[in-house]
Amino acid sequence: MPLAADVALFERETMTDDQTPNHASTPAEIVDYYDRHLNMTLRELSAMTGRTIKELKRLIMEPAK
């Protein structure tokens, strides 16, 4: 049975549908958010995450290694 602290940590680290990405978001979270919000521009995503558009293009277009 997981400890309450482990569950709380998992819940903080896992984005839900109503959360927006931020500077601490993982690349997978950013790509997932972008995939679920089809009208979002890279400029908007860049403002949310603090990553450059070039970095975001790389995340979205190249699969994780």
Image (spheres, rainbow, N blue to C red):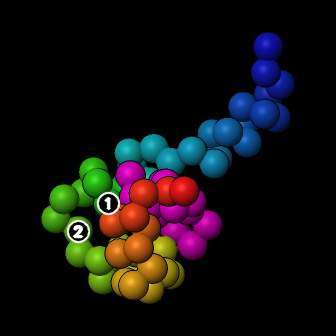
> In the displayed structure, does residue 58 sit left or right of residue 43?
right
Q: Quadrant of the C terminus?
A: bottom right
Q: Is residue 31 magenta?
A: yes
Residue at the disc numbered 2: 40
Instruction: Name the image quarter holding residue 40.
Output: bottom left
**Residue 43 image position (x, y, % from top left):** 30, 83
Q: Nearer the viewer, residue 23 or 58?
A: 58
Q: Are the two marked residues, 1 and 2, in contact with CB atoms closer than 8 angstroms?
A: yes
Q: Position of residue 59 (x, y in %)?
A: 43, 67
**Which SS class for mark 2?**
loop
Side of 9 relative to 32 (left or right): right
Residue under the image location 57 percent in, 44 percent down: 14
The disc label shown at residue 34, or none? 1
Q: Residue at x 38, y 45 (%)?
A: 17
Helix, strand or loop at mark 1: helix
x 73%, y 42%: residue: 9
Q: Which residues are magenta?
A: 20-32
Circle on res. 5? none
* Residue nearest the observer in this picture, 61 or 52: 61
User: Residue at left 61%, top 66%?
Assistant: 24
Q: Is residue 19 above or below residue 17?
A: below
Kind of residue at badge 2: Met
Task: Tell me: residue 33, above or below residue 42.
Answer: above
Say which amino acid is labelled 1. Answer: Tyr
Q: Find out whether residue 9 is within the magenta segment.
A: no
